Amino acid sequence: MDERLAKALEFSNYRSTIENQKRNLRSRVDSLQTITYNNGSFKSNRETISFVSTLIDLGNDEIVIVDERDNPIEINDPKDFLTTLVEAYMASMNEFLAESKKLAKARSIKKIMDW
Amino acid sequence: MSNNGVCFFAYNNKDIDYVKLALLSALYVKKFMKNNNTCLITEQGDFEYLCKSRGEELVDKAFDEVVITSVQHKHNMRLHFDSPWSKFTSEFKNSNKHLINEYSPFDKTLLLDIDYFVRNDGLDYLFDSDANVAMYQQARNLKHEDPFLYERYLNPVGIPMWWSTVVYFDKSEISNMFFDIWAHVSENYDFYKFLYNFPGALFRTDYCVSIAVHLMNGMKPGDIIDIIQNTHMVYMDQKDDLVEVKNANDWIFLANDRETPWKDITTRNYHDSIHMMNKRSLDRNWQDLLGVLDG
């Protein structure tokens, strides 16, 4: 095979592999951000954290939030809920950053797989 | 000891050593889950073979309870692949799966297929939830693609398919009703096959549970059954292969391309619990998968 074509195909395989690894990582971040609290399922994302934080700032001691399954969930301790959300968010972001850096440095399939 | 636990059905045939795979899957539950009491449901001969071939010490480590059944299974041949280039058919003994609520020694039970490998504690929340029954309703392969149409819907304009790979249930009236309907569909499978227009000669419990969910929801979309973690199940297709086990939650696969089956890409998966459909691949890697559990 022409050397240039062989290189192009190798690069194409590398791109397919790295794109899939990025999808794996996003999926992992998504599952790290999903928490269960009082039988509700919540996403620890910027929107939820900001919303809960605003409700606390406005002096609400008890709140009701619609979860990912569209069910109303009663939260009796909003501060504890916010802490849980922030912890999940931070854990997911730390892993996202660390793994993204590893992927950015990996310039071949062998590097991605640690071979 | 809480009365929560995880059950596995395993009946060997001449091609696949299901009890050997169940042993491994149970050890992953022990490693990663907090609610990790386990129960093997099998036949006397298969259990004796397991103890003899793997040693009683390892069997005792994997299973807290063993339920011996004596069931005449319906003839049910299943086509298996091991990569796109190798296939075989073998007997699949699954006609008593709906009896799990009678067999289970636990108050709250997670029923796992023996090829479902837990690699995180994400399923533990179910035991603290108020769900009566929970399953996965969607799945994605190792390349994050949806399954083929007939593993998403029972027919092109049909009801959604639910996966019976992972079934959580308690001992409530709702869950008893669910298993009663599953039993009824199972006993009248040909009728329901005609009514719901689903394909194939294989008896699939996925179709039974899908119809049970549909009936329990009043034949409309509904939420009587919980979706596990409100997300999808990850699966390794039968045409994919496991090529390296780095540690208990870092595995490298060859993910096959459906449209161009001569092409695979490598994919490295961390932490996801995975439905490992290629049984031969599991068998090839059994020793490695066992070995990394001590690390």
Image: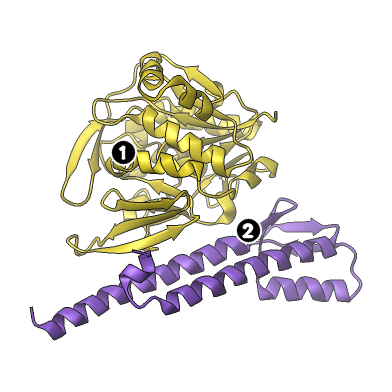
**Residue depicted at 67% across the width and 70% down the height:** A90
| Residue B188 seen in the figure | no
Label 1, secondary structure: give it. helix
| Of the pair B214 and B90, the residue shown nearer to us | B90
The colour assigned to chain B within the rendered structure: yellow
Q: Mark 2 points at which residue?
A: A69
Q: Which of marks 2 and 1 is in front?
A: 1
The chain in purple: A
The residue at 47%/48% (across/down) is: B248
Q: Name the residue under label 1.
A: B283
Direction from residue A108 to residue A6 in the image, left or right:
left
Q: What residue type is labelled 1?
A: Asp
Amino acid at pointer 2:
Arg
Task: Relative to B37, say whether B245 is above or below.
Answer: below
Rendered location of residue A59, percent (x, y): 92, 72
| Mark 1 Cα-neighbour bin, 10 Å: few <14, some 14–19, many ≥20 | some
Cα distance in 3D space between marks 2 and 1 = 38 Å
Rendering coords of residue B64 (x, y %):
56, 24
Other-residue count near label 2 (Cα within 10 Å), few / some / many at <14 / 14–19 / ≥20: few
Which residue is at the front of the view, B255 or A36? B255
**Chain holding disc 1:** B
Direction from residue B92 to residue B47 in the image, left or right = right
